[in-house]
Image (cartoon, coloured by chain):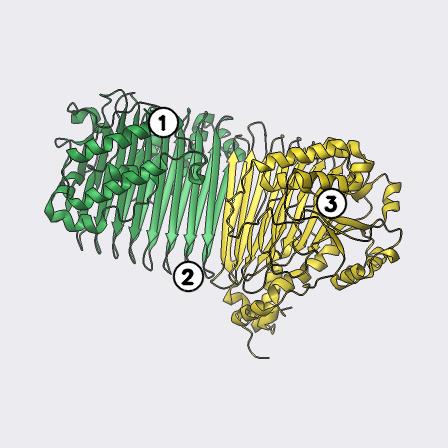
Amino acid sequence: MSKYTEDDLREELKTKEYEYGFYTDIESETFPVGLNEDIVRAISLKKEEPEWMTEWRIEAFRIWQGMTEPEWANVRYEKPDFQAISYYSAPNKKPKYDSIDEVDPELLATFAKLGISLDEQKKLAGVAMDVVVDSVSVATTFKKTLAEQGIIFCSISEAIKEHPELVKKYIGTVVPKTDNFYAALNSAVFSDGSFCYIPKGVRCPMELSTYFRINQAGTGQFERTLVIADQGSYVSYLEGCTAPSRDENQLHAAVVELIALDNAEIKYSTVQNWFPGNAEGKGGVYNFVTKRGLCETNAKISWTQVETGSAVTWKYPSCVLKGDNSVGEFYSIAVTNNYQQADTGTKMIHLGKNTKSTIISKGISAGKSQNSYRGLVQIASRAENARNFSQCDSLLMGNECGAHTFPYIEAKNKTAQIEHEATTSKIGEDQIFYCNQRGIDTEKAIALIVNGFSKEVLNKLPMEFAVEAQKLLEISLEGSVG
Amino acid sequence: MDLKDKLVSSFLAFENRVDVDAYVHDVRTDAIKIFEEKGFPSKKDEAWKYTSLNSVLKHDYSLFPKQEDALEYRDVKKYFIHEIDSYKIVFIDGKYSSHLSQTTHDGIDVCLMSAALSKPKYQLVIENYFNKIASKDSLTSLNTAFSSEGAFIHIPKNKVVEKPIQIVHFSSGNEAATMLQPRNLIVVDENSHVQIIERHQSLTDNPVLTNCVTEVFANKRAIVDYYKIQNDNLTASLIDNTFINQKRESVASVHTFSFGGKLTRNNLNFFQNGERIDSTLKGVTIIGDKQHVDHNTLVHHIEPNCESHQDYKGIFDDSAVGVFNGKVIVEKEAQKTNAFQANNNILISDKATINTKPQLEIFADDVKCSHGCTIGQLDESAMFYMRSRGIPEKEAKGLLMYAFSNNVLSSVKIPEIKQRITKLIANKLGVNIGFDL
């Protein structure tokens, strides 16, 4: 085999097309484009929501109107025209399927292409899936098993109807309507999402997972996820995303709220592989997400994310460590290639005593991409003995990409102990040489090194996801490597 | 009338009063326009997120203080590094004080900005260097608009200046509140070597706001050592803007010792315009009360094979606030860059605050860049070790904190400064460290 160099790899990366780029033709019921109070009301009506929810949305909409789009992130993009987006799209041929056979066969084919055939997943992986295609939940599996334990796992619109007291109590408590531009927008127009409630002392027996797909052309996606872990419970939640190729930019502004009550633990893992745009930087998904978790006493929230897709990413999964002894974790791999831009990181807000947080962030940039880590560690004056460790490593491939770190550290308590480290490097020639010398060709060597670089984070993913995440790393970065 | 309006409206009167050539006049006129447009920075500006100027700007400052009473050297001797022979450029309320100063034109120029701006023989230097690297932000522009006095140092080729140069700005407090805007220009030509010590000192409790701009040009293989001693009293505030332009193979270092002042903001900018440049930025901050010290550094790596070292230590007591915002930019041409940045802080009071933001922006792949940042307390086992050997708690703390800031002092090249700083640190920490350096 001829010598495989980094240049070859770069060449390959340039030409590597998005494998999951296809478009399923499902008849969708789509609202007219534009946004006003009537549209918000119509969405609410369509979802058969109670009065309080409609009011909540309208209030969010009014707040949103008074806000301006944030510009502080280290990304450059053409701002979406919010009046040119259709705010509701649901796959037709509703409602509710009793069994998987009733699902639109074309939809099933889509899933098969993605390798997430429901049947297979059901049997082999033991994963309950709440599949969301264009915002409406079409199938929920394993609901029965979960129901026996008192676990509620359904779409948010269902939850609004069936468990209004829980939704009313918790929605908007972690990410208020006023939080930011996109959170306000989401609050006004969210079409669907997942809802999960784990009762006191219950350890959820399986990994809960949701797949998001953006399907209908020109449809903005506004998912809303709410996970509540009651006292002493445990849940591991997976979220994975792929989207078909499309030329115009698509907007995704999701909100995820996690609530871990006393002694509860939530593990939230994401694999994101939306369409990143083609090699010329055309198209791709705008991913502006607000994710935040609230930890009560002794609670723990752990975010793990593998970000390989989207043209523009703007995402900061955060933990508010409100209770004493609570723990927040953030593990992230962000890979950017071609013209992708990612500004991602986390916020750890230490309010309670003896709170701990860990941040491990790995950024890999190739092509002409820009990859930023932006994080905040804040120790409030009453947070005695707070402890934080942060590590941000960047790997650069080629000299047309950029890696940036913007860590904000604010300490107001003398007992705080905070460490922050960041490094930037490239794949060392000596590392490649070492591998070559031992009979490992350059192609494999690069794969090995990239894998080793990300290992700390990959290890944190649940088994089912780790395999998929590695696959995604290959697709988005390694070309045929590995 | 707020301070901004006062400044803008007094510009014309100021401009008519000073006699300058057309070049500087244009620069000043442009600068005041920028300031008028931008105004004073607020917390909404990312670079000023953690530092508010509101408490400083509320005073009714006198912009052109009356002529000073002469100061006696023995009264102000302690503010100089008096143990060593040195050139001195001394200003009282922004006016040059000839009897406290010791300037020279013998081979090198250690003199005044006002002279450089008005005398034809300096015209070329002024046109080549004045306001060439100072940024166009509002405070620097404000200084540019009112620039008339300060230190002017020009070291020609192949000169090693045999003794350090001290630049001292006194504020006499003759006015109820004074605003000073000194402007320094330092040009060091090929193969030359210079050491500079700068200090701003207020002599009374009347509020003083100093908005100082210093431009330093280190040309080919020049060596520049700059020491800034900031130990002013609690009513004096300082905004210190320093811009250093380095040509190839030059070595420049800036040490900033911040022990006093109400609000101190250090904007320190290094631009590496050449290969194999070495830049060092170090600082020790020890403050208490309601003091506020903000270090805002920028190292811009533009060409390959350069190095930069940043090391800032901070100890914060009472309700003090410390800010560190260190930015390293590595351009894509700047391959083989080696950039290191460390910021370590100790909080010794429950009300003290630290905000730190070490920032890296990297566009080149073959670089080694790292930054580390810690916030912590004194090591308890080390404390125990010393106390079990009969060292009182206060002394033990002092020793540990001294050790904490020591590796910043190790690169100080003038022994007398090292000694002075050691004493200041000991004073600050309220202990008598029984050893000399």
Q: Chain of mark 1?
A: B
Disc 1 + disc 3, Cβ < 8 Å: no
Subunit that carries the residue with mark 2 = B
Residue at x 51% of width, y 26% of height: B350
Residue B246 location (% of width, % of height): 30, 53
Label 3 belongs to which residue?
A: A193
Categorize mark 2 by other alpha carbons within 10 Å: few (<14), some (14-19), many (20+): many
Say above or below: B297 vs A13: above
For the residues labelled 1 and 2, the Cα–Cα distance comes to: 42 Å
Give the residue drawn at x 83%, y 40%: A151
Quadrant including the C terminus of chain B: top left
Q: CA distance from mark 1 to mark 3?
A: 50 Å
Q: Residue most toward the bottom?
A: A1
Q: Which amino acid is tagged 2?
A: Gln
Q: Is residue B92 above or below residue A129?
A: above
Judging by colour alone, the chain drawn in yellow in this rendered image is: A
Label 3 sits on a secondary structure element that is: loop
Q: Nearer the viewer, residue A339 or A6?
A: A339
The one of A55 and B386 positioned closer to us in this rendering: A55
Looking at the rendered structure, the kind of residue marked 3 is: Gly
